[in-house]
C-alpha cells in the first residue's frame, strides 16, 4: 500500500439509503461479489460500506498467494455436502487462479501476477514425510498426478537454495500477486461498472434486508456480510470467527550477492512443512516477503487495528528468514505488518445465503482467501441473481460450525496450540525418525485442525 502512495479516501455514507444489494466490507470478497453482479446485471444498484478504505484488511495485507488449495478441510466438506460436492469445490479452486488472471488482464490491473506454482519445502525427515502424505491425500481429492511433484534436495536447490532443505513438493496450481495493486485496481473497476463504495462508514449491526451503520441505515433486498476476521466486531458475532494474526516482514531489495546466495530465479510462492507455518514470495523488485503466525491470537479477539506488529513476531520472522536464507542476513528489513484472517471452529470456510432474509455471508478462508474470495464472490452473485448453478451446490455451501469457546478458554487454547507446535517443530528437527511429533498430533486433534 505504501508503494502505491497515499490512499485517497472515498466519501462516507451521507444518511439513510436504499439499494438492491448492500455489501459490508470492501475487501476481496465484497469487491468480487459486486464485480460479478454488475457484470451480469448492470442495472442493479450495488452499494459497499467499508469502515476504513477498500483493501484495508486482509485483502491488502496478505502474502500474495493465489493457491488452488481449498479454504478448509476436504473431509469436512465431504461430510457436509457429499464427496462429489467436495470434489467440485476443488476443481473450481483450480480454475479460479486463471479466472482472476483473466479479469486482471481484461481490465488492465497490473498486480505483478505470475503463475510459477507453489513450492512446499522440508528441512527434516518428518516434514518430508508429511509432504509425501500431502501428495497421497491431494490425489484422493482430485489433484492430477502430473501436477504434484516431489523434489529431492538437489532438485529443490535448482529452484531455490533453502538452508537445510531436504526436499519439496511442487504444484503449478498457484501464482504470485501484489495484493494491494489487485484490491485497489478491483475497487476502481467496480466503481467504473456502477458500484458505489462508501468508506469511513462503520457497520454496527445487520438483519433481514438492512444494515445499521454509524452514518445511517441501508435498506436492501440483499445483504452480504464480507468481513472475514473482522466479523467479531459486529454485535452478536463475537464467537463465530476467531480473528487470527498473520504477520509479515519484507526486506529491502537484495543486492546481486544476496540473490546469488538464494538462487531464487522464478516467482514460485514458498511455504514450509513446519507446524508453525511460514510462507514467502519473491517480489518483482527483488525483495523477499515472509509471513507467519508470530503471536497468533490476542485475548478477547482483540487485535491492533492498524496492523502494527508485535516485536516478538518480528523477531521470530527475522530469525526464520535468516535461518532459511543465511545470505540475506545483511539485507535490512524494510517493513513489518499484521493482517487478520478468519478461522471458524472447524477450520473450514463457507458461503451461505438465506433467500427468506436476503442475508448472505462468506468467509473463514483460514489463510487461502486470495483465491477463495473470487470463488465466493461468484457464488454469492449466483445466489443473489437466483441462479441454481454448479457454484451454489459446491461442498462449502451453507455449512455452520459450532461457536468458539468463551474466554479465557479460547485464549488459553489458541496460545497453547502454537506453543506446542513450536515444541513439536523443535523435536522433529532433532529426530531422524521421519515421524510427526506426538505433540503436534495431539494439538491438532484438540484444535480440530
Image (spheres, helix red, strand yellow):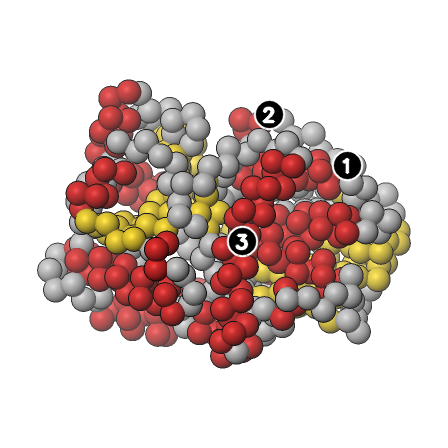
Residue in view at x 65 percent, y 37 percent: 106
How packed is label 2: few (under 14 Cα within 10 Å), some, or many (20 or more)?
few
Question: Disc 2 marks which residue?
Answer: 5
Can residue 357 be seen in this snapshot?
yes
Residue in view at x 26 percent, y 31 percent: 263
- Which numbered dot is residue 192? 1
Q: Secondary structure at mark 1?
A: helix
Question: Disc 3 marks which residue?
Answer: 95
Q: Nearer the viewer, residue 275 or 52?
A: 275
Can residue 339 be seen in this snapshot?
no
On the image, the x and y values in percent for residue 352 come to: 66, 68
User: Does 46 sit left or right of 26 as displayed?
Assistant: right
Task: Decide which of tag 3 and tag 2 comes sooner along the chain.
Answer: 2
Task: Decide which of tag 3 and tag 1 comes sooner along the chain.
Answer: 3
Residue in view at x 38 percent, y 70 percent: 140
Q: Secondary structure at mark 3?
A: helix
On the image, the x and y values in percent for residue 313 come to: 37, 45
On the image, the x and y values in percent for residue 182 come to: 59, 38
Q: Determine contact: label 3, label 1, CB under 8 Å.
A: no
Question: How far is the residue under mark 3 from the one under mark 2?
Answer: 33 Å
User: Does 42 sit left or right of 112 as displayed?
Assistant: right
User: Does 215 sit left or right of 240 as displayed?
Assistant: right
Where 406 falls versus 103 (above or below)? Answer: below
Number of numbered tags placed on the structure image: 3
On the image, the x and y values in percent for residue 408 come to: 46, 68
How packed is label 3: few (under 14 Cα within 10 Å), some, or many (20 or more)?
some
Where 264 falls versus 396 (above or below)? Answer: above
Question: How far is the residue under mark 2 from the one under mark 1?
Answer: 21 Å
Amino acid at each position: 500500500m505504501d508503494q502505491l502512495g497515499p490512499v485517497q479516501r472515498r466519501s462516507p455514507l451521507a444518511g439513510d439509503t436504499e439499494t438492491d444489494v448492500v455489501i459490508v466490507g470492501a475487501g476481496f470478497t465484497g469487491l468480487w461479489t459486486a464485480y460479478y453482479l454488475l457484470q451480469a446485471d448492470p442495472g442493479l444498484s450495488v452499494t459497499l460500506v467499508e469502515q476504513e478504505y477498500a483493501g484495508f484488511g486482509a485483502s491488502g495485507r496478505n502474502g500474495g498467494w493465489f493457491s488452488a488449495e481449498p479454504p478448509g478441510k476436504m473431509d469436512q466438506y465431504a461430510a457436509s455436502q457429499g464427496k462429489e460436492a467436495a470434489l467440485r469445490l476443488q476443481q473450481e479452486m483450480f480454475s479460479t487462479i486463471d479466472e482472476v488472471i483473466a479479469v486482471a488482464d481484461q481490465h488492465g490491473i497490473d498486480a505483478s501476477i505470475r503463475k510459477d506454482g507453489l513450492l512446499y519445502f522440508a528441512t527434516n525427515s518428518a516434514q518430508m514425510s508429511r509432504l509425501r502424505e500431502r501428495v497421497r491425500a491431494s490425489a484422493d481429492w482430485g489433484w492430477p498426478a502430473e501436477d504434484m511433484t516431489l523434489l529431492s534436495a538437489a532438485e529443490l536447490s535448482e529452484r531455490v537454495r533453502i538452508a537445510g532443505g531436504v526436499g519439496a513438493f511442487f504444484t503449478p496450481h498457484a501464482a504470485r500477486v501484489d495484493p494491494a495493486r489487485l484490491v485497489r485496481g478491483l475497487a476502481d473497476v467496480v466503481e467504473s461498472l456502477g458500484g458505489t463504495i462508501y468508506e469511513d462508514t462503520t457497520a454496527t449491526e445487520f438483519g433481514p434486508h438492512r444494515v445499521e451503520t454509524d452514518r445511517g441505515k441501508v435498506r436492501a433486498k440483499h445483504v452480504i456480510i464480507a468481513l472475514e476476521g473482522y466479523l467479531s466486531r459486529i454485535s452478536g458475532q463475537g464467537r463465530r470467527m476467531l480473528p487470527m494474526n498473520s504477520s509479515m516482514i519484507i526486506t529491502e531489495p537484495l543486492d546481486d550477492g544476496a540473490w546469488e546466495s538464494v538462487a531464487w530465479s522464478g516467482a514460485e510462492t514458498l511455504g514450509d512443512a513446519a507446524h508453525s507455518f511460514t510462507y514467502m514470495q519473491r517480489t518483482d523488485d527483488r525483495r523477499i516477503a515472509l509471513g507467519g503466525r508470530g503471536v497468533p491470537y490476542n485475548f478477547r479477539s482483540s487485535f491492533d487495528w492498524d496492523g502494527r506488529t508485535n516485536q516478538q513476531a518480528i523477531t521470530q520472522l527475522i530469525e526464520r528468514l535468516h535461518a532459511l536464507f543465511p545470505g540475506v542476513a545483511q539485507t535490512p528489513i524494510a517493513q513489518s505488518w499484521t493482517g487478520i484472517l478468519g478461522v471458524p471452529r472447524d477450520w473450514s470456510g463457507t458461503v451461505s445465503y438465506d433467500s427468506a432474509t436476503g442475508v448472505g455471508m462468506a468467509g473463514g478462508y483460514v489463510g487461502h482467501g486470495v483465491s477463495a474470495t473470487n470463488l465466493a464472490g461468484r457464488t454469492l452473485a449466483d445466489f443473489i441473481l437466483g441462479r441454481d448453478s454448479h457454484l451454489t451446490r459446491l461442498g462449502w455451501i451453507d455449512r455452520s460450525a459450532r461457536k468458539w469457546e468463551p474466554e479465557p478458554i479460547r485464549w488459553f487454547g489458541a496460545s497453547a496450540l502454537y506453543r506446542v507446535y513450536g515444541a513439536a517443530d523443535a523435536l522433529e528437527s532433532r529426530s531422524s525418525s521421519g515421524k510427526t511429533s506426538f505433540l503436534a498430533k495431539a494439538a491438532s486433534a484438540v484444535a480440530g485442525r
